[in-house]
Image: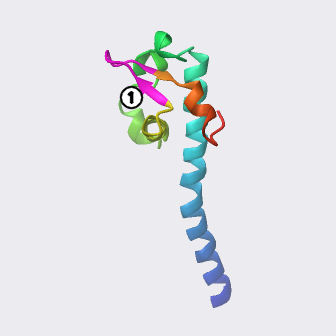
Amino acid sequence: MNTFTFIVLIIALIGLWLTVPQLMMRRAVGKVIRIFRQRNAVGQSNAKTLDELGLGRRGLERFMVRDYKPRALQILSSANIIRHTEDGKFYLSEEDLQRTSLKG
């Protein structure tokens, strides 16, 4: 393998290292939105706990496979797309989702 090929390979690997997490996060955001819709956690009156949504903390499995959904939930909450009630339940705000460029 010559030097040029090696440099191109390293650049490609760095590009993948930077791109793949962004793609996985985008995919996780869509999954989280779908979970809220499928479980009808849309609107404050239909709010559900993270365990009811299947987004609660998982045990050992969490360490074996990189799960981007908790971070996606955090991002959606920061954007006010996922909101929470006083009793710790969560719901999707379709109105706020429509105001963004996110697709669910």
The residue that label 1 is drawn on is: 58
- Where 20 sits versus 93, above or below? below
- Where 14 sits versus 24, above or below? below
Residue at image coords 52%, 16%? 43
Residue at image coords 37%, 28%? 57
The residue under label 1 is which amino acid type? Answer: Arg
Q: Position of residue 45 (x, y in %)?
A: 47, 10
In the rendered structure, the answer to whether residue 97 lies left or right of residue 54 reads right
Q: Where does the magenta region start and end?
A: 82-90
Q: Residue furthest bottom?
A: 3
* Of the pair 9 and 36, the residue shown nearer to us: 36
Q: Mark yes or no: residue 2 visible.
A: no
In which quadrant of the rendered view does residue 101 lie? top right
Q: Position of residue 61 (x, y in %)?
A: 42, 33
Residue 36 within the magenta-colored segment of the rendering: no
In the rendered structure, the answer to whether residue 84 lies left or right of residue 98 reads left
Q: Position of residue 13 (x, y in %)?
A: 59, 69
Could you say whether the residue bearing mark 1 is in a helix, strand or loop?
loop
Q: Dot 1: few (<14), some (14–19), or many (≥20) neighbours within 10 Å?
A: few
Q: Position of residue 70 (x, y in %)?
A: 43, 36
Q: Mark yes or no: residue 5 visible.
A: yes
Display coloring: rainbow
Residue 87 within the magenta-colored segment of the rendering: yes
